[in-house]
Amino acid sequence: MSHRCNRVSLGLTCLVVGILARAVAGAGTPTAGDLYFDNFQVKNPFSGHVYDDAAVQKVHFSFDGTSSFALGTPVLVADLGKSANADGLIFAPNGNLLIGGSTTGKIEQITTAGTVVGFVNVAGTNPYHLTLSPNGTTIYSGGATSLFQGGDTPGPLGITPVFADGAGHAVSGDDTLLTQLAFDKTGHVYYTSSPDTGVGSVGIFNLSTLTTTRHIMGLPAAHGITYDPFTGDLMVSGNSHVTQIDPATFNVVSDLDLSGLGVNMLDQVYVDGHGHLFAGDNGQVNLFTGTGTKGKLVFIDYSGGKHLVGDAGSFVASNDLVLALDDIAPLAALQAGDANFDGNVGFDDLVTVARHYGQSGSWINGDFDGDGKIDFNDLVIVARNYGHSLTAAQLDSLDPSIRADVEAAFAQVPEPASLALVSLGAALALRRTRR
């Protein structure tokens, strides 16, 4: 976060205005939607004067799939007040937003309409970057124990139940301080450890023993981290870099240096599972005057070509957004029913539930309600979030022992999702009359 003491800019020498975009060699995939983000508090460290409250905002974005990325005007969702601060931003399983309290030691919950639900404390640490466990029951955070450690620096692992008070836990291994965790769809956990400059380590984290195994050190992009189901790679961000890493070998697959587009302090990074990446750049802020350069929203489309962030065929844009930009939330809440983390709930997710039906398991096995077992309630969650029609052929391919439960679960779904069952029922009736 650029409001920390080691990020104070006493002289502003570079102001880049508008959209900077790199030329594209190949077509990508169009996308559009609303993006939620937060900005940190801008406060004079000596006088205590607050120039800019911490806040949560949203902005509409659109990409035409070839050469044009546009942002709308930011809209205020919630002003968090002069005593609050803001850092990590993610969605809770209920669709509300969770905001890391950074120096306040709290995680706050608000609705997307801006209503404050409440907050919880994370004792012994300040929750900067936030990550939700795949089963939706636990918030993991990384962050310093004190502002005097230098701001958005790594710290103990915060473990917080959704939604109750949590605490920091000491970490051992190659790196003893954490910035952020990321989960892949097979249950492996990865970590970054770096100060706010982004240069640091990336490796594997053992949640059972709270132990790190470092695989890369001195990486410029080692601050934000997320798993990308589109490529099967890790996407990490920091400094002016976005780096794509093979999680099996920890080889750098691709790297993109955005310093030429005026980006120098990337924070968290998120993907949509369809070949699009979003990251927030803090910009530069003078804490003594409350002025500075706006943080930039970085957008990368790598859905076409070689599926590499640094490839010449990938589209890259860097748009001025707001002063003191901090973190950007994923494009949607952790999608209930999405077992394979591809951003959609479809037949593959239904098959996952069917294969583990009646067994114990976690999110990746189809336990979407977090009760430790895969049952009818999880089928209903899939049905409620199902993204397209379930065909008779698909139903026939399921194990007969679960077929009746699937039909019953989908029958509970209100319009318009139940329209899929109308066509399904008609098809089944026709098939039965011909037998």
Image (tube, grey):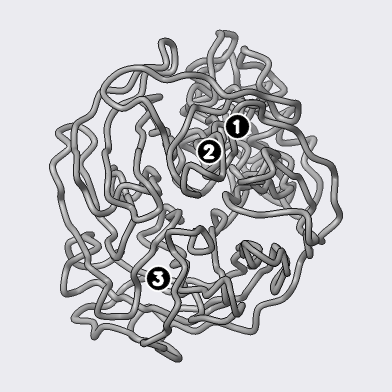
The mark lying in front, picked from 3 and 1, is 1
Q: Are marks 2 and 1 in contact (CB under 8 Å)?
A: yes
**Element type at marker 2?**
strand
Q: Which mark is residue 131?
A: 2
Q: Residue at x 60, y 80 (%)?
A: 289
Q: Tell me which amino acid carries mark 2.
A: Thr
Give left or right: position of 184 versus 100. left
Residue lying at the far bottom of the rendered structure = 17
The mark lying in front, picked from 2 and 3, is 2
The 10 Å Cα crowd at callout 1, few under 14, some 14 to 19, many 20 or more, is many
Q: 357 or 276, which is in the foreground?
A: 276
> From what the image shows, is residue 188 above or below residue 38?
above
The 10 Å Cα crowd at callout 2, few under 14, some 14 to 19, many 20 or more, is many
The residue under label 1 is: 139
| Residue 358 placement (x, y as % from top left) | 59, 9
The 10 Å Cα crowd at callout 3, few under 14, some 14 to 19, many 20 or more, is many
Q: 125 or 375, which is in the foreground?
A: 125
Q: 351 or 164, which is in the foreground?
A: 164
> From what the image shows, is residue 194 above or below residue 369?
below
Looking at marks 2 and 3 on the same chain, the residue that comes earlier in the sequence is marked by 2
Q: Tell me which amino acid carries mark 1.
A: Ile
The residue under label 3 is: 299
> From what the image shows, is residue 178 above or below residue 269?
above
Q: Residue at x 40, y 49 (%)?
A: 224
| Residue 287 placement (x, y as % from top left) | 57, 71
**Element type at marker 3?**
strand
| Residue 49 placement (x, y as % from top left) | 73, 69
